[in-house]
Image: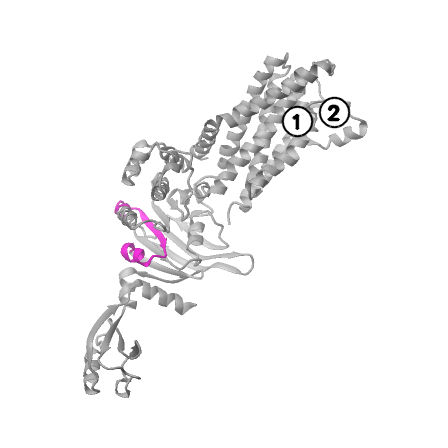
Amino acid sequence: MNWRAAAAIYKFEMARTGRTLLQSIVSPVISTSLYFVVFGAAIGSRITEIEGVNYGAFIVPGLIMLTLLTQSTANASFGIYFPKFVGTIYEILSAPISPMEIVVGYVGAAASKSIILGLIILATAGFFVPLQILHPFWMIAFLVLTAVTFSLLGFIIGIWADGFEQLQFIPLLIITPLTFLGGTFYSVNVLSPVWQTIALFNPIVYLVSGFRWSFYGIADVGVGVSLGMTLLFLFTCLGVVWWIFHTGYRLKR
Amino acid sequence: MSPIISVSGLTKTYGSDFHALRTINLEINRGEIFALLGPNGAGKTTLIGIICGIVNPSQGKITVGGHDIIRDYRAARSLIGLVPQELATDSFETVWATVSFSRGLFGKKADPAHLEKVLKDLSLWDKKDSKILTLSGGMKRRVMIAKALAHEPSVLFLDEPTAGVDVELRKDMWEMVRALRASGVTIVLTTHYIEEAEEMADRIGVINKGEIVLVEQKAELMRKLGRKQMTLHLKTKLDMIPAALAAHNLTLADQGRELIYTYDTQSGRTGITALLDDLGAAGISFNDLHTTQSSLEDIFVDLVRQRS
């Protein structure tokens, strides 16, 4: 294992985050705070408690997930797409490093960044609403697993993308709608039975549900199912990444 | 001594009918400067790309320092430094950060003293804290060379190192390449500037349409293929070459005002005396004469034309 190479990529990516601090950290924190102001304080005060949890507090896990998913995919896809775009990818491809080390570097950095963001948002939420975390270990576990899984997804998108438009395509057209429909702002249980069944095809329902369970002990689906689905996405993404490096898809001519 | 790079039976096809490389066999000797010469689209960059791991080969076997580039890619790639043709740099990084990154990527322990030496040798030391986007094109190219040298490679690939580089910088680059060779680094450069190969290389390989047309010591190549031409500026125009001179290898040029005699410098008898005697006997006189030796460029153009 060439750890120095993985570390070099990781540091490079984290330095990029450092250079774009405003865009990377400040803007997601501001936009999430706006959600708290609008949904938590303004509208939330008129909404009754959901399963014994204050509405403002209820949406916190969902909002953290929303940021985690969008930031992980955006950051990881940009991280690998940009060297492809400017041509510096030649150095990564010609270096004595394995796909595993490349993934550890890029995906590790993207996941670290969104975990940091998630924690900052959690801390920010503490200013607006009363928080409790019943299962801190599982909270962190879901946070890390989701960040890693969606950073892997972002990595795949970044390799697949041929232009900046495609880079935006999946996050904007698939991930954001699925997140909003995935129980970020409501419990899936409030939906009519038909829509509840449809919602179960939305992978994000499981992520949000499991994450919310780690906070308040309430969930739309069993926590075991949530964990299982999260791991399923993780291994699916790992499989695709393995295939990409195995065939050289969009990386090698 | 075993070659540092050995390529055997290498082919690269795109789709079903485009052959970028056809059965390449090539050996690069340790410590030499090898110039790969060929027109645009001949396959130079593809060949380098495959050796360095950027392009997948279709068939064939390549070893670098005895290590197979696929099976034993870590050992093989550790030996290689690559400077690609196109300028591709991380604009927002500083020079120092980017060379440190390259060294780390190749799994080498941080060594500020080595990086300092590399940057000083390339006259980049005073720019080490500058962001790359503030540098000139020539400096960016040197940054790419510095990145390739950051991990102390045994073989340095320079793909068109002087494309778009001014004369002054080109000379500096040649000096640098010679100094590197003196320090034991093997250098493979591709170029379509003949003068570059002529100036620098120990051996020259000519590639055209995906095939290695020839590999030869430069001096040997120049000698073997070096023909000389003697041009006679005639006093009076000739309409055709007189029958008396038919035995000589002559052509008429400049509407009959010049007579060109082509001969081989290698053969024991150049035939010049006999020609001059026959010219005198035929009553043809001339004002002036000059001789020219074919350059590598002429040889190259001939070779490429013959094969196409």
Give the image location of residue A65, x and y in percent: 62, 25
Q: Position of residue B159 (x, y in %)?
A: 38, 50
Mark number for residue A245? none
Question: In which chain is the residue bearing label 1?
Answer: A
The quarter of the image holding the C terminus of chain B is bottom left
In which quarter of the view is residue B235 placed? bottom left
The amino acid pointed to by label 1 is: Leu
Say which residue appears at 28% left-offset and 39% top-offset. Answer: B123
The answer to which of marks 1 and 2 sits earlier in the sequence is 2
Looking at the image, which is closer to me, B219 or A66?
A66
Asked if marks 1 and 2 fall on the same chain, the answer is yes
Q: Residue A188, labelled with which disc?
A: 2
Q: The magenta stretch spans which residues?
A: B179-201
Does B194 lie within the magenta span?
A: yes
Looking at the rendering, which quadrant does residue B8 occupy? bottom left
Tag of residue A207: 1
In front of the other: B114 or A46: A46
Quarter of the figure with residue A42: top right
Q: Mark 1, mark 2: which one is toward the viewer?
A: 2
**Label 2 amino acid?**
Val
The residue tagged with tag 1: helix, strand or loop?
A: helix
